[in-house]
Image (cartoon, grey):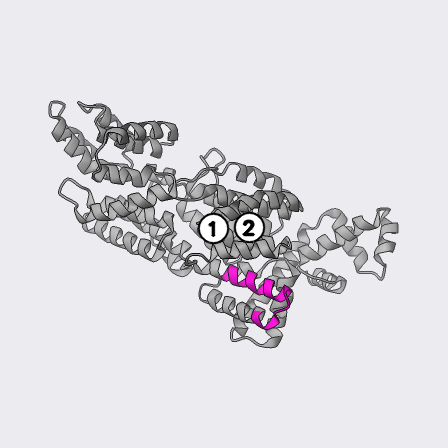
Amino acid sequence: MIDAVREDLSPSDPAHTRATLRRNWLRLILESRTRELEQLCLTHPEPHDPHVLLIRACCRDLLGDSHGAAFLRGQGLRIADEDFVVCFTELLLAADTATKAAAADRAREALKGCGPDDDYPSALFLLGWTEVRLRRDLADAIGLLRSAAAEARLHDRAETFRLARSNLAFALTHAGLFTEAEETLDALPVAATPSDWDRFEGGLPQANRGTIAYWRGDYDDAISQLESVVDESAPGNNFEALARLYLVMSLVALQREDRYFAAAGLLHGVSRTDKHGIPWDTLRRVITALLAHAERKDELARRLAAPTLARPGAAVAHAVLAELYRVLDEPALAAQALRLATAAPLPRYARVSTLVTSAALLSTAGHGADAHEHLDRALEAAMPERVLAPFLSDDPLIGDLLSAHAHRGSRHERFLGSILERRGKLARRRTGVLTPRESEVLAYLRTTMTAEEICARLGVAYPTVKTHIRSIYRKLGVTSRRAAVNIADIR
């Protein structure tokens, strides 16, 4: 196709060349002809034409040159009138959520007036792609991407079809429709080599599979999928950055303390600015605070997390933050984070997370009946897609609440049983990440020795031994010496 476009350009006819670029630029970008497209722009008889500048800005952005993209975009917007090209370059280039949302609204109107010189299948995909990132209405975004895939198939656009289906899988994943997302991923056409767009987005299929594995509590599978995506030389946004975040969450869930230092480095590389409507700095701060808590640096965790309470529009991050504040014994801040998380419709997995956190907060406040009602709602929401992660926290309160719920009786008895079984396996797994000193203390806990006697035997201060015992209990997800010994013996 690139040859046909090249032949159709006319150095002596700027209007014809402009129309040719307008008709083909989106398709060329989606079909990984980004470099060739930029070269065609440079041969345009009027290289400072606003359309040429804006198309070049999109090329620069996809090729990883964000500074060049910003300069060219500024030059183009300074002299351009609002039209189809301006609208759809803004969908690609606008970083902040408000600008991108306004561009998406204009794009909807532009699609209604698409003419013969406008690339409707590509534009429809780009609008769906944008709406997924804005998270305004995932059901609407899913519908747009389904429509884009159908339109691409009708027009024999194989690459646009693949990208539409790939991003549909992402939309389904982040709507919490895990089963359908996996089916879509399984049926994806496989590109022979990564396209420009694939490199631009950075590992979408594996990042999606890793995300699903995380929320289902399959942390080892999540780590395997996500590690295949992480590229420390990447710019720290899009799916590669998402993989970093979920990889760190999976390592924390397994208490892989041997990898926490490297995990902190991965988080440091996540973008501190929004891109394509994604609040990367909020996400980075919340997961960095989660890691700090795992490293027993609770004051650092509080400092890192505090600014995110003033930043709405990151529902999943705030759901995670609410649980973090709960275990930090900050119920008022946990409630504030819950309000931020539930200010808009939540995907299923985040809704489960907020319900479990609410149940734990209610239980701590002495509202047992309400706590069990919230927990039962969480089980009901989690069961269709087997969302297990919110129930697998190593916090003993969650374990005690689940056990009490099982004795109380639940409409979801079988599912609750599978959660308790998974918690037991995970607790036994975590015994393998005890430090050498913790393993030594655990051995003494099997005896009748008191904590004071253990201190004397080890030649350390009493507070040190108590710290080790608390750490052992936390890692095993128990609250007593007998339970710790029983879990370790079963392993």
Image-quadrant location for residue 445: bottom right
Q: Is residue 337 left or right of residue 43?
A: right
Q: Position of residue 30 (x, y in %)?
A: 28, 40
Tell me if label 2 and label 1 are in contact, CB under 8 Å.
yes
State the extent of the magenta-drawn residues as a range.
352-370
Image-quadrant location for residue 26: top left
Circle 2 packing at 10 Å, graded few (<14), some (14-19), many (20+), is many
- Between disc 2 and disc 1, whose residue precedes? 1
SS class of the residue under badge 1?
helix
Viewer-closest of 151 and 316: 316
Q: Quadrant of the N terminus?
A: top left
Please tell me which residue is depicted at 23% across the width and 36% down the height of the picture: 25
SS class of the residue under badge 2?
helix
- Residue located beneath label 2 in the image: 250
Q: Position of residue 163 (x, y in %)?
A: 31, 46
Determine if residue 31 is in view.
Answer: no
The kind of residue on which mark 1 rests is Gly
Viewer-closest of 473 and 79: 79
Q: Quadrant of the C terminus?
A: bottom right
- Residue located beneath label 1 in the image: 210
Q: Position of residue 150 (x, y in %)?
A: 23, 53
Please tell me which residue is depicted at 22% across the width and 48% down the height of the picture: 109
User: Would you place residue 358 above or below residue 226 in this image?
Assistant: below
Image-quadrant location for residue 413: bottom right
Circle 1 packing at 10 Å, graded few (<14), some (14-19), many (20+), is many
